[in-house]
Image (cartoon, rainbow, N blue to C red):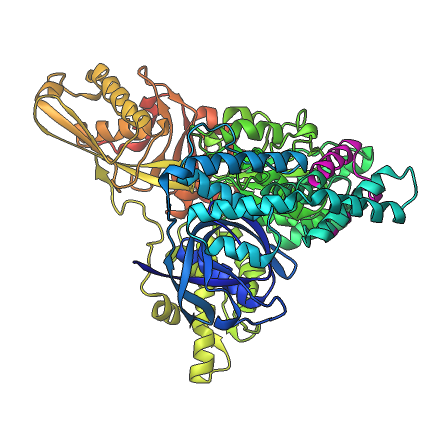
Amino acid sequence: MSIYSYPLLCTRGAVIFPMQDLAVEVGRQVSIDAVNYANAYNSNIVIVSQKDLQVDNPGPDDVYNVGTICRIKTSRERDDHLKVIFSGITRCRIVKHFIKDDVNFVEVEEIYDVVENEDEIEIITKKALAEFNVIAQKYSRPGFPIRQLTVFDSALASVLADTFAQIYVQNIEDKQLFLEENNINNRVQMMLTHIDKERNMDMIEQEINEKVKESIEDGQRDYYLREKLKAIKDELGGSDGSSDIDDLREKVENEPYPENVKAKAREEFKRYEMLPPTTGETGIIRTYLEWLLNVPWYQKSEDNENLEDASRILDEDHYGLVKVKERILEYLAVKQMTKSLKSPIICLVGPPGVGKTSLAKSVARALDRQFVKISLGGVRDEAEIRGHRRTYLGALPGRIIQGMKRAGTLNPVFLIDEIDKMSSDYKGDPSSAMLEVLDPEQNYQFSDHYLEEPYDLSDVLFICTANYRDNIPPALLDRLEIIELSSYTEIEKLNIAKNHLIGKQLSLNGLKNDQMVLDDDMILYLIRHYTREAGVRQLERVIGTLCRKSVLSILKDKKKIIRINKKLINAWLGHEIYDYGTKEKKNQVGVVTGLAYTSFGGDILPVEVNYFEGKGNLIVTGQLGDVMQESTKIALDFIKANAKKYDIPIEFFEKHDIHIHVPEGAVPKDGPSAGVTITTAIVSALTNKPVKKDLAMTGEVTLRGNVLPIGGLKEKSLAAHRSGITTIIIPKGNIKDLDDVPDTVKEEVTYIPVEKVDQVINEAIISD
């Protein structure tokens, strides 16, 4: 027979049978440790009952030798104990007690059921089942759930006897006798014997009624029923956590919950009181009531309406971001003027590391509101938003209601992170569920499947974040007020590092302000040669590394002050990772620098073109997407149509293959804005004329040679400036977007607006 090892949990007066569920409050530390340790054993645990309930630390001689292997279905912390629902699997006999990692363990062997007489099992099971259901109906208790079966076998008889023992047998010694009996015939016969005792319940019921009637006045029906139920439970020696329910009932009556919530709670209280304390449904109802009453329904915090304080807090926490700060102050001003205002749904869109999440925290601090955050990255189940219905095992409210409970108020600042990274599958479309959350015309009656009562989200200030605007579902985008947070310039990164990052990292690493000196030149050196990003996340990591190295040097080498210089940076961080200014070093034929806009900010995109004898094929490499591959075909067809203009023999295309490649072939690339870049590179290669090395370009090209506007001009300009580009060719339709480009960039970069491809070629290609 196989021997298994599991954590051991000793109970006081609780015996769990196979195929049965039981809720247990686990309070002793040794028991809590056993429950937590069971996670490493597929949530399996052995449960045995103590012989003496007064023993606090039972040893091997203080517990019965036969118990049950159980699985932990749910476990929730509450104050200083756990509320756990166990599900019985099989009987077991303890072979050995031992301790592992300060947790009680046992080695056990399974006990298998035995049928003594196959012929009599059907007769005895039918009789027991009939008696069982008569008793259940008479005393308004749960009957056997398989009462309609016509085929009776040993498995049914075993479950029938165990169900009776779990629900009806109150004496711990009698329960243990049922558990230790593995002969099914004997176990069902024991059940029939106990049912005869149940028939005497009429007399006990009458005595209970007399006791209750003596203690209360006539006409107090509700109180009478409650006292009667309490007396019954005292007589049976059970406990169902009624004090918790009484506290919740008092909370409903004394606090200003909405009337629909009070009505729902009262309905659940009635259902709870009608159920036996040992059934699993009582725990489900109690959990539901706790969620229903602990979610904020009327609690609100007072907003800080002092515009000067709000402006000061926003400036303290963030450098720049003028438009975002203005929008928050506008919201406060209008709210102060009107005394009421539906909260807007703000969406901060920008590459990683530009401060979207920290800005939302600053907004909460400026408004003096609670802050709560959820992330939707990878969420593909609608139930994550709306919650599960209570019919599901382990059902819980959705993330929105969970966040509101954490906030504790009706008007927090609620950050919904990575809204552009939701997906959908057969379980539903979470973006559709988010419509009811983010639409001001609907969210005053948000429906969560678990709560079942409409919830008002209209006072919540929702702030969403996304890396890429085009990935936000269109229906959601229509409800959002988009605020773009673009890449930082070098000057902005320098100021952010000086005013925020260095002080934060010094504090985190236990350094005083004068123990590590990092001047402006060294900060710029780090920005240019050890980071290449739109935001400042990597810059903060690099500064943190320098702080940790400084702490080690101070403690190990007994230095008092560390002055960071290039030599020290190279020693601690290694050789320079990036070359500052990665533009082409010289004018080249068939190589043109394009500009790209990704979810991580702007970047330069060199395009290479070469040709060789062949059959007129077009070869494209570099993991180009469908849109970009179409741009290559449009560019080539435009050049074929205008071959004479560029002095290219028309038969050239029939005898040569043209290869277009975009370096960093492992990185997928897509978008129409590389059209002019590809066209210029092909013309340069086919005419053997070089392209200016310090020039970059962006724009979509058409078959007629028109240059169309593109998006992300600011990010592309910052990437070009960062790479040492001095001239950028842009579509004429993007002139209006130059207002968003920082002055520091416009002072050092020359912009050439164009409408036709011919203008691009004339500006970019060096003539003989």
Q: Residue at x 47, y 72 (%)?
A: 102
The spot of residue 702 in percent (x, y) is: 34, 18
Q: Which residue is drawn at 50% across and 27% down?
A: 148
Q: Does the magenta stretch include residue 265?
A: yes
Residue 615 falls left or right of residue 565: left
Along the viewing direction, whichever of 196 and 730 lies nearer the viewer: 196
The spot of residue 90 in percent (x, y) is: 42, 51
Numbered range of the magenta stretch: 243-272
The spot of residue 763 in percent (x, y) is: 33, 30
Q: Does the magenta stretch include residue 656?
A: no
Q: Which residue is drawn at 72% across and 46% down?
A: 367
- Which of the 4 quarters of the picture holds residue 570? bottom left
Residue 190 falls left or right of residue 633: right
The quadrant of the image that shows the N terminus is bottom left
The answer to whether residue 5 is visible is yes
The spot of residue 176 in percent (x, y) is: 52, 57
Along the viewing direction, whichever of 234 and 343 lies nearer the viewer: 234
Q: Which residue is drawn at 75% across and 51% down?
A: 309
The answer to whether residue 321 is visible is no
